[in-house]
Amino acid sequence: MGDVLIVQNSRSGGPSRLGGWLADAGLRLDVVLAHEGAPLPARLDHDAMIMLGGGYLPDEDDRAPWLADARRLVAQALAEGVPLLGICLGGQLLAHVAGGEVTGDAGVPENGSTPLTIRPEAAGDPLFHGLPEVVPAIEHHKDAVTRLPGGAVWLAETRACPYQAFRVGERAWGVQFHPEVLPTRIREWRAKGFDPEEVYAKAVADEPVSTPIWHQVVLRFAALVTQRASSRGRSDGRDRDAAAVAPVAAGEPSA
């Protein structure tokens, strides 16, 4: 068993199917609704952390005051080797904390199922090794990482947004895309220049290819969490009642 802190940064940006995959792998999920004012922990004592998406830049504390605490926890995860997965805003936040650069309204917006090119560097990565050369993934962003942190491993790219996936250190990953999002969520997005029904239909067509791949990647992350919990001497009963464990429905909306 292992405990995963999941930071939610927007009303619709929940863990969705990713939460179900992690729970099925035997992990306990502590979902903090930061956007609603729920406080982030003073210290990261979980076995892993997932930072979800939201419509902010990583340092927009005036709009999202909890981001200062989110950055602090990301810095702790990096310093202590706690497994970390940052999605969209979460990936941008990881890049920002680690010394990279994030730019608002960068390049061409991406929306819906988009082919990612997996780079050769991914061959040695714990999460991305052995993936097909091109994998569909759901996108919804206009901000982007525009410079990777020094020493980061560049794992996946698209033409419009080069830094789609990267790793910092041994256990921290940032992705620009949304492995947690189901195609139905796309119908709620209104992105200028995109036909929602056309974007939805493409995501549905790509799902049989993309879902098994991102499921596998998430299970690889879960295995790292379990390994860390075991190395720390966690037991199935440790602090079970003390942890705030949030139930996750497989169809919960995300962003």
Image (cartoon, rainbow, N blue to C red):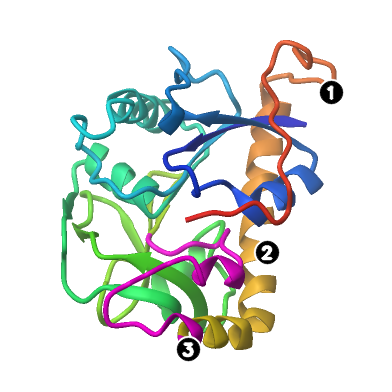
Q: Amino acid at mark 2?
A: Gln
Compared to 158, does 165 lie above or below? above
Q: Please say if the residues under marks 2 and 1 sit with CB atoms less than 8 Å apart.
A: no
**CA gap, disc 1 and disc 3:** 46 Å
Query: Which residue is farthest right?
Result: 237
* Residue ID at (37%, 48%): 54
Compared to 193, does 222 lie above or below? above
Q: Which residues are magenta?
A: 176-198
The residue indicated by pointer 3 is 198
Compared to 99, does 36 lie above or below? above
Compared to 216, does 133 lie above or below? below
**CA gap, disc 2 and disc 1:** 24 Å
* Residue ID at (75%, 12%): 239
Q: Secondary structure at mark 2?
A: helix
Image location (x, y in percent) of residue 197: 50, 84
Q: Amino acid at mark 1?
A: Asp
Q: Is residue 46 visible?
A: yes
> Which of the labelled discs sits on residue 236, or is there none?
1
Image location (x, y in percent) of residue 76: 38, 24
Q: Earlier in the sequence, mark 2 or mark 1?
A: 2
